[in-house]
Amino acid sequence: MENENVSKNFIEQFIDQDIEEGHCKTVHTRFPPEPNGYLHIGHAKSILLNSGLAQKYNGKFNLRFDDTNPTKEKTEFVEAIKEDIKWLGADWEDRLFFASDYFDQMYEAAVKLIKKGKAYVSDLSADEIREYRGTLTEPGKEDPAGSRSVEENLALFEDMKNGKFADGEKVLRARIDMTSSNINMRDPVIYRVAHMTHHRTGDKWCIYPMYDFAHPLEDAIEGITHSICTLEFEDHRPLYNWVIDEVGKDMIPDKDEMPPRQIEFAKLYLTNVVTGKRYIKRLVEEGIVDGWDDPRLVSIAALRRRGFTPESLKMFVELCGISKANSSVDYAMLEYCIREDLKMKRPRMMAILDPVKVVIDNYPEGETEYLEVVNNLENEELGVRKVPFSRELYIDREDFMEEPPKKYFRMFPGNEVRLMNAYFVTCNSFVKDENGVVTEIHCTYDPASKGGNSPDGRKVKGTIQWVSAAQAVPAEIRLYENIVDEEKGVYNEDGSLNLNPNSLTVLKNCVVEENLKDAKAYDSFQFVRQGFFCVDAKDSTADHLVFNRIVSLKSSFKLPNA
Ligand code: ATP
Ligand code: MG
């Protein structure tokens, strides 16, 4: 038992306790996004945590849209969020809910509070309420409207509902304790007037419940047992429990099930990476990025477009663990996870990012041979493919030097190298244009070295990739760096973002091997010596292939504790 607990996180330990003590019959969790933007990697953590717990305890998992604030909410976001959660593999089955479906019940709960003398209509403005609330060191002041009778409050609340007041003119406050040491308990606003059209309920309502009132009721109505949220809600927990005790308990569908229990964990932050919805939104709205799914972002849609897999995100979230202390994780760990996930699963293909032509002078003109190439040396199951080889090829400009420094083992005049999986070739000469740029390299090959094997035990130190010119498929390749300048930190003093001018590099003249000509959206590959790449789902077409670099091959990243 002891040992078992050690490997469990603190949330699982709480749940175990609730089950052992007979409070909880069926574990029921939920993910409650507000449809006001796209989900990001932090949400992925919450989704996988909540759905994972339901799975582990043989319980249930709800997807519930917390759509109680119509200002920023849109159906576009609802659809995008559903797609992202599905893609992650979290299954809400038929348990899809909307907080807005409970507006009637929430209204009734507020009426009930008024009848119990636990809520009143206030005339104070938002500024006055803030002023009356007091500070951490000073108690709050009683609201002048606090002495209204139940009848008067009922009538006024109904008038609020019926549109008799302008936005901000009246609010409904819970009567709790203006002297509480917890400011959230000083008669919090629970309903406000807002003449806004809701994306689902239209103009039915002109009053909307506040988050702290709505959320516990949503949990109660759905029979949630463990309401898992992030640390910023820790100070709201007493209010959460107050609402449950006063009006939520009656709403729980199974009277023998425990009332929802709020448990907080630390948000996931990535060092020097913009995760907050608010900031991503700014980048999108200011046109700095190409939409919410720009591959430089860490929204789930962006990670998917960049070429991350659900498995890699799961691995990442598991490595991060669940904690009570805020901390920040290095982006390199995310890169580690995608490399780990793809390295055995994807074929290793040849692509040339910055092509320069090579002519093999002693290779027969007009001839093409198809060489057999192993798809992934670490995973036989991926089989073999045929790659065309001919007299004219492309290699990467980086792999040739006119005057090499010491320890440069790639192509230079007089040097013999291996063309990967093909032949040994020796560079004899090269041609430059009027600007001094090398335009053509001439080599001879050794026919006896077919397959890239030494014919007589002689060694070559360099092995380089190539693509046969006649069959080469043109491609655009996009390389990414962090969108913010890591040296300077994420924000300037004035709150603007420190953008990295090199966050996107577009290479328009790349070539890839013939086998990639039919690559489709989201297909991903290893390009030998270059990294992992994924076909861009937005811009790639059959006539114009576009690849995103997901991640390069090398990293100095080491797993903590490894
Ligand atoms: P943000 O401001 O970070 O963009 P949010 O909290 O406004 O996100 P919601 O739609 O309200 O977004 O969040 C839905 C759920 O996701 C909440 O339970 C919230 O606690 C959780 N969540 C949000 N951000 C993170 C994060 N960085 N790490 C873990 N969970 C998160
Ligand atoms: Mg929020």
Image (cartoon, grey):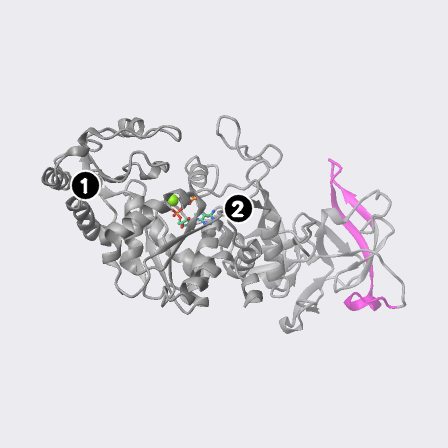
Q: How many marks?
A: 2
Give the secondary structure at mark 2: loop
Quarter residue 18 falls in? bottom left
Residue type at the position of mark 1 = Cys
Residue nearer the viewer, 249 or 560: 249
Q: Which mark is residue 325?
A: 2
Residue nearer the viewer, 91 or 372: 91
Picture coordinates of residue 345 (x, y %)?
A: 60, 66
Alpha-carbon neighbours of circle 1 within 10 Å: few (<14), some, or many (≥20)? Answer: many
Give the secondary structure at mark 1: loop
Quarter residue 166 falls in? top left
Is 464 included in the stretch rendered in magenta?
no
Residue type at the position of mark 2 = Ala
| Res 48 seen here | no
Q: Which residue is mark 1?
A: 206
Examine the rendered structure and indicate whether residue 466 appears above or below residue 231.
Answer: below
Q: Give the residue drawn at x 60%, y 60%.
A: 525
Is 440 included in the stretch rendered in magenta?
yes
Picture coordinates of residue 22 (x, y %)?
A: 38, 67
Picture coordinates of residue 398 (x, y %)?
A: 73, 47
Q: Which mark is residue 185?
A: none
State yes or no: Cβ of the residue under disc 2 lies below 8 Å from any atom of ligand 1.
Answer: no
Q: Which residues are magenta?
A: 429-455
Q: CA distance from mark 2 to mark 1?
A: 39 Å
Label 2 with label 1: CB-CB less than 8 Å: no
Q: Earlier in the sequence, mark 2 or mark 1?
A: 1
